[in-house]
Each structure stands twice: as structure tokens, then as C-alpha cells.
Image (cartoon, grey):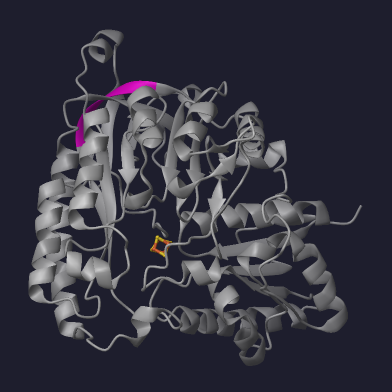
Amino acid sequence: MTPPRKLHIKSYGCQMNAYDAQRMVDTLAPEGFVETASVDDADLVILNTCHIREKASEKVYSELGRLRAVKDEAARKGRHMNIAVAGCVAQAEGSEIIRRAPVVDVVVGPQSYHHLPQLLARAKSHGRALETEFPVEDKFGFLPAPRPDAIRARGISSFVTVQEGCDKFCTFCVVPYTRGAEVSRPVAKIVDDVRRLADNGVREITLIGQNVNAYHGEGPDGRTWSLGTLLRRVAEIPGIVRLRYSTSHPRDVDETLIDAHRDLPALMPFVHLPVQSGSDRILAAMNRKHTVSNYRRVIDRFRAARQDIAFSSDFIVGFPGEAEEDFLATLALISQIGYAGAYSFKYSPRPGTPAADMQEMVSAAEMDERLVRLQELIDSQQSAFNAAAIGNTVDVLFERAARNPGQIVGRTAYLQPAHVMASPDIIGQVLPVTIASLERYSLLGELATSAQAQGAPATFSPMTTSQMTTGA
Ligand code: SF4
């Protein structure tokens, strides 16, 4: 029997990239690849890159420099290591990577992961392979079905892609160029995927897409279904106890989504709704296609539908032309909304985007100072939100054994880690936990007695900022 080949994927950036990494593992499994955590003994290393961060391509080249040494060392030991670059930097700068980095064997854009086996074969016969075109065929039709053992190894929470691409063209964002136009998967395929995941132990599903609430997939009735309608269908699948979705655009929040939050207990009351700025002038320059008051109205509609709902958001400080009064408007919006958490970034230009040609740059010192002020405000809201959980009883979906012996860790409705001393038998169950204390972003508590659980008030607890998001 041929020994398995080892695959190491280093993934950066958004949830979509994390999901894509799983997709690549599933695509390569039939070729005899198994994942390894160690880059040194890998036969194939894939850098799954992100173009959102500042100096993204420089970071890729310096990582490739490190990998060249690892590849040379493998060659000295008589072993051939392939190196592939995937993700949005590959999509945006594929030919340049091939030109500048001879160590790279394969460059593959996000629309072409299903061709990885053929690209590796082409690299073997021709030396290198590059594929970054958007395919003409259905880009979701060939998603590999993960094997049951792979699903079980990934735990009780899983992403399912429902939509890819974005038509919004915010002036700072590369996604419409790297991921292409919005495309939605048919409902039947999503339901099949979720069923397979549920049959193999998954209890929580996050439906993902760059602009997930622009979902417009074909339903089994031949009509176009919205995200809200899709969520209702997925909530019916036996075994699925929690549903989430990410990332949403304020303009695409429709009544079906609001109603889904009102009606579906499995749909978690925690919405990531990027706003980016609290100034209408800057929102217009960003081409966000919504105003501050539109955004506030959307928040109000969610809150009217579900009182325990909480929000996180994305903010960019120092967008070209952002004056102090624009920034103050952002702080004012944050104060009005009250977030459970947020991701905040200093603006940095992305080559090829309209904002990259804008002239009125905010100085680095001003950006630094604004980011500190904004993060202080968000941190204080997040801390207050965290502290509100202490003394309350909240539902926790238990995921795995924690690092501390005897502890099991799970997540609240608001993605907050919660630890209890308990038997591993509780993994996969949603159980009430009485929260005793808070350690940084983690809640510590005890499994509640049924009397405590019945009398428990609804509580909030905020997310951690460990999951970076991209999109919408
Ligand atoms: S920021 Fe979001 S909505 Fe705007 S172009 Fe990028 S992915 Fe689309």
C-alpha cells in the first residue's frame, strides 16, 4: 500500500478561507493526502492567502522565503515537497507569484480548488502550474463531499458555503475582483451537505458567503429562495441545534431574515453586521450603498424581532478623506448601538481598488490615534457585555475537552467560550450553565440544576475577537 502523502495548509484571513482549506483537504483526500500539522514533513504545503490585510503580498513572499529553506532541506533528504499558493493573493497576483517565486509549484485561485489534483499533475510534468480564471461551469457543482471520518474529526461545528462573490464593489475591497460575482448554491445541495454533517455528529452550522444575505439560490420549488427561507429549511434537519450565518450586508437584510430570527429558536441571536463608518459622507465614498440611518433602522428591526439579539461589526478608521468629525460620528454610532464586539482596522489601500487612487490620505499618526480611541470604546462595551453574563444561566453548546484537565469547553449563543468541570459525555449537547466568573474572554461556570435553568433570565455574552471576518 502506498503511504499517505502529507498535506499542510496554512490559512489566513476569513471564515471563507477556513472553509476553503477544508474543501482543499476534501479534494485532495482521494489522491492519498492526509493533513499534517507539521510543515517539515509535508509533501504539499498550501499557503491559503488573504488579500485584506496590509502588505498582504509582501507577507506571502516572506513566508515563501521561509518555505524555500524547508523545501531545500526536504530535497537534501531526498524528498520532493510541492508548494502551492491559494486564496485571494493567488487570485490577484498569480502571474507575479510565478515570476517572482520559483519555489512555488502551483498557484490556484479560489474558484479552481477542485482542479488541484490536475494542477499538481501539471506541475509534475511541466514544472509549474497556474490557474486563476473564473470558471464558466457552476463553481459549486463539484464541491467534494467530505468523508465521515473527516467530518467527525472536525468536531461539532461546521461551515457550509451557500454563496460566493460580491456585487457591491465597496471602494476599499478586493473581494468582487478576487471572488467574482455573487453566485448562490441551490438549496437542495446545501440541505444534502447539512444532512451529511448532522449524520456525522455536527450540531452547529454556520452558513457562509462573502455577502451571505444576498443569497438567492434555487429552491426545490423552482423559485429563488432568500437566506431567511433557506435558514427555515436547514433548521428542520434533525440533529442541527444551532444555526448562524456570516457575513451580512446591511442593505441585503430582508423581512425573511428578520422573521427567521423571530421564529427559529435554533438561529442564534448574534449577528455580525459590518457598518465600516458612522459618517454618511465616508459611507458614500466607500460606496457602501447604505446610510447611517438605514443601518440603525436595520438594527431596530432585528431588535424588535428578537430582544436578546446582539451585534458585532467591522470598522475601518482613516479611510481617505475621513475628518475628525466623521470619526466622531463613528464613535457616536458605536455608542448608540452598543456592540458585543467588533473588528477594527486602519485603512490601507488595496491595489486595483478605486480607494487606492484616492488622494486625501489620513496621516499614519491620526489613524493610530483613532484606532486606539475606537478600540477603547469597543473594548469597554465588550467588557460590559461579558460582565452581564456573570450570575446568569446561559445555554452552552459543548464542543471539546479544554486544556485544563477535567474541563469541557463550549460556546454560548454569542460565541463566547464557556468552561465547566464535567464529563466528556456532554460534548455535542446544549446545556444550561450558571456563570460564576470571567477570565479574559472566557466564562467559567457550573452546569445548572434544572431549577436554575427554568428560572434563568435571558442574558447576553459577547463574542471573542478570535474569528476574523471578511466580506459584506
Ligand atoms: S466589503 Fe463586503 S460588501 Fe463591500 S465589496 Fe467587499 S465583500 Fe462586498
| In the image, farthest residue toward the front | 223
Residue found at x 32% / y 68% = 287
Q: Magenta stretch containing residue 435, yes or no? A: yes
> Which residue is more in the foreground, 330 or 83?
330
User: In the shown orientation, is residue 455 left or right of residue 40?
Assistant: left
Q: Please give the range of residues in magenta.
A: 431-437
State the quadrant of the C terminus.
Answer: bottom left
Q: Main secondary structure of the magenta part?
A: strand
Residue 236 percent across, percent down from the top left? 53, 22
> Which residue is more in the foreground, 354 or 35?
354
Q: Magenta stretch containing residue 253, yes or no? A: no
Residue 169 percent across, percent down from the top left? 42, 68
Identify the image quadrant of residue 417.
top left
Residue found at x 68% / y 54% = 25
User: In the shown orientation, is residue 448 left or right of residue 129?
Assistant: left
- Ligand 1, by image quadrant, is bottom left
Identify the image quadrant of residue 55.
bottom left
> Which residue is more in the foreground, 49 or 447?
49
